[in-house]
């Protein structure tokens, strides 16, 4: 619509003469997007972008749709016809327009009440089993994933399945997670040369993606593949996790140290001279021959499924890796040469906007990956991104701003997901670095969540603060979209913080927030995946692991590594030196945890009630369900 209608001089003139035109960046203002998308979905039964909404001066919607073409076609009016019709209604039937707007506003208020009216008890064993059964019904046995085309990467659902398997031993849960992870990793949605994942697949088999690469998808999938490796020891999952982390550092890290929001789907097609989706990523057999020579080209075509007919447009193919290479060294050499050649093509543009929530997700994923896969550079990258959020996004009064660019903060206030995901990132940094400042910073953000985003009467959470700009209704939604909902992300961070500190206030808030998960677990598990994952942690405790020993001591580090490798759902890990009163004061989980026989020791606790401590990493690994080998 931007190219077809908004940039048309005649149409733009008509629009500006009769309307106040406002174009909203839904990444900058997810609250505006959420409220009016809900109105569109309520009235039409479906939503999508671009979203076109006509409002009264009081911001009440009265007519809306999604895409309108520049000329009438397929039964749709043109955008000009829509404008003319709305203008006539506003001029000649103002009272009727007002009545429609009033009914819509009342309907939205009624829908909002649903989230505050449910039970306040978190989901139990039966609820989580029902979620697993419902997911089993929707699981694509042939191609992995859930549902049909288009197919989105279900990172949050994978996290739930892995946690459910770790807690219950369910082989069905593990199988769905593993098969989905492998199908995505081998498909065209995964960049086989440069790492990272595209937004979604247009087909049910993960072959042809919408080529846009989003920070949030890659942060969530990085963590999911890391946890797949931790649960199974899969070499493929480990390789995908590392290549995704490298993609984030290479292509999305900004000079300030944080991570840009996206790479465009389109790039310049050198043959046609026009912008085209996927031009940067697709290959023809002849291009392989020119680059590699006939023999290696034949090998590359077989490895990456490049065919004469193609799997994409105009006889080109999206690269897939449907089986493990027989000669891995040969594969790596061919992949390297193709990657270097692709780098010479016109690259997709990058959206350099820094979004606090998405950087929080990246911080958590990179910190964990760096610690578990022994890549200290990834931990350093996570710390640098966190430092940028502190320096640019965090205001002196402890509030978050949602976006920045080139080191300068935007004006938009942070929404719930910004606080929750940033806290999640800081908590992960504390777990891998042991620096208590990160735990304290997370606590400050979560206190803001409790004060400004929580309904005290019901425990429900709102997407915007109580002192934010007032829209036609205060948006709230517990269901996952492309990222965990702010609601369930906050529940997870609150639960983790409570496990470190013993705070009943934070744990109770998490339990109350999870009440909605029980209501949705059996009916819509694909859209409450992170809430289900948090519920698994709650049912398991979560387990709290305190490791005490001299910093840098090999025995201390061995216990710490065993703790981090544990698959116990949502387990928290704190490491401190024995007798460090300051550390114990900052991290209550470490208080009163002495050495055992003069040796470093690990305490595994639930609600601060601990099993007998152990000095043996193998014993600790057994208690926490470590699946991969300890080195």
Image (tube, rainbow, N blue to C red):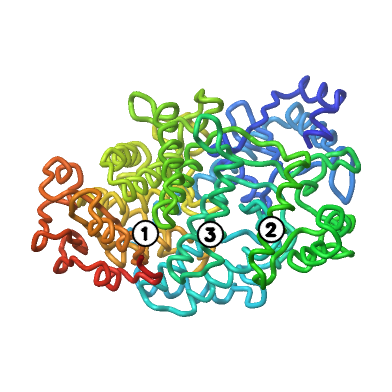
Q: Nearer the viewer, residue 523 or 297?
A: 297
Could you tell me residue 351's position as x and y percent? 64, 35
Q: Image quarter for residue 383?
A: top left
The residue drawn where x is 27% and y is 71% is 618
**Residue 495 falls left or right of residue 389:** left
Q: What's the mark number on residue 333?
A: 2
Residue 354, located in which quarter of the rendered image? Answer: top right
Q: Callout 1: few (<14), some (14-19), or many (20+) C-alpha neighbours within 10 Å? A: many
Q: Earlier in the sequence, mark 2 or mark 1?
A: 2
Image coordinates for residue 28, horizontal then vertical, percent:
56, 34
Q: How many marks?
A: 3
Q: Which residue is mark 1?
A: 515
* Residue 550 in the figure: left or right of residue 73: left
Q: Where is mark 3, residue-wise? A: 155
**Residue drawn at 14 percent across, 40 percent down:** 582
In the displayed structure image, the side of residue 362 where residue 240 appears, left or right: right
Name the image quarter holding the N terminus.
top right
């Amino acid at each position: 619509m931007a190219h077809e209608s908004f940039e048309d001089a005649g149409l733009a003139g008509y629009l500006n003469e009769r309307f106040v035109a406002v174009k909203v960046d839904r990444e900058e203002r997810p609250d505006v997007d959420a409220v009016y998308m809900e109105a569109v979905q309520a009235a039409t039964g479906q939503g999508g972008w671009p979203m076109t909404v006509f409002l009264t001066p009081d911001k009440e919607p009265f007519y809306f749709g999604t895409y309108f073409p520049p000329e009438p076609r397929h039964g749709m009016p043109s955008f000009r016809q829509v404008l003319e019709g709305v203008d006539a209604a506003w001029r000649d039937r103002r009272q009727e327009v007002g009545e429609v707007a009033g009914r819509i506003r009342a309907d939205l208020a009624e829908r909002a009440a649903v989230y505050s009216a449910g039970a306040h008890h978190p989901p139990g064993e039966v609820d989580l089993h029902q979620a697993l059964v419902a997911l089993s019904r929707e699981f694509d046995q042939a191609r992995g994933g859930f549902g049909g085309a288009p197919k989105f990467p279900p990172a949050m659902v994978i996290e739930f399945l892995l946690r459910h398997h770790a807690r219950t031993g369910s082989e069905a849960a593990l199988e769905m997670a593993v098969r989905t992870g492998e199908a995505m990793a081998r498909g065209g949605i995964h960049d086989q040369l440069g790492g990272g994942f595209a937004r979604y697949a247009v087909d049910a088999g993960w072959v042809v993606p919408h080529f846009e690469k989003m920070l949030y998808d890659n942060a969530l999938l990085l963590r999911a593949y890391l946890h797949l490796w931790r649960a199974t020891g899969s070499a493929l999952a480990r390789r995908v996790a590392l290549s995704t982390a490298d993609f984030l550092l290479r292509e999305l890290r900004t000079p300030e140290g944080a991570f840009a929001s996206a790479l465009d789907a389109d790039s310049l097609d050198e043959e046609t001279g026009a912008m085209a989706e996927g031009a940067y990523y697709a290959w023809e057999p002849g291009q392989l021959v020119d680059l590699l020579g006939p023999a290696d080209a034949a090998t590359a075509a077989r490895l990456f499924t490049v065919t004469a007919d193609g799997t994409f447009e105009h006889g080109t193919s999206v690269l897939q890796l449907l089986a493990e290479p027989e000669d891995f060294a040969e594969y790596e050499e061919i992949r390297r040469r193709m990657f270097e050649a692709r780098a010479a093509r016109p690259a997709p543009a990058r959206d350099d906007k820094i979004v606090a929530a998405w950087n929080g997700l990246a911080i958590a994923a990179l910190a964990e990956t760096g610690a578990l896969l022994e890549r200290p550079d990834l931990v350093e990258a996570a710390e640098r991104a966190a430092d940028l959020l502190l320096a640019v996004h965090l205001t002196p009064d402890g509030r978050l701003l949602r976006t920045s660019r080139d080191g300068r903060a935007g004006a938009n206030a942070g929404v719930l997901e910004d606080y929750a995901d940033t806290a999640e990132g800081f908590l992960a940094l504390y777990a891998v670095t042991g620096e208590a400042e990160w735990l304290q910073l997370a606590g400050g953000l979560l206190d803001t969540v409790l004060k400004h985003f929580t309904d005290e009467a019901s425990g429900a959470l709102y997407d915007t603060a109580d002192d934010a700009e007032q829209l036609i209704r205060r948006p709230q939604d517990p269901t996952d979209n492309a990222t965990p909902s702010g609601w369930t992300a906050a529940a997870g961070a609150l639960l983790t913080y409570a496990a470190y500190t013993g705070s009943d206030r934070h744990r109770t808030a998490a339990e109350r927030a999870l009440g909605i998960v029980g209501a949705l677990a059996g009916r819509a598990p694909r859209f409450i995946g992170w809430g289900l994952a948090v519920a698994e942690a709650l049912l398991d405790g979560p387990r709290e692991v305190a490791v005490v020993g001299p910093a840098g001591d090999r025995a201390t580090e061995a216990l710490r590594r065993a703790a981090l490798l544990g698959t116990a759902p949502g387990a928290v890990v704190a490491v401190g030196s024995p007798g460090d009163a300051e550390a114990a004061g900052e991290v209550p989980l470490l208080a009163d945890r002495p050495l055992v026989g003069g040796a470093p020791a690990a305490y595994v606790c639930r609600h601060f009630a601990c099993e007998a401590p152990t000095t043996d990493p193998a014993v600790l690994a057994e208690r926490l369900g470590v699946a991969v080998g300890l080195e």
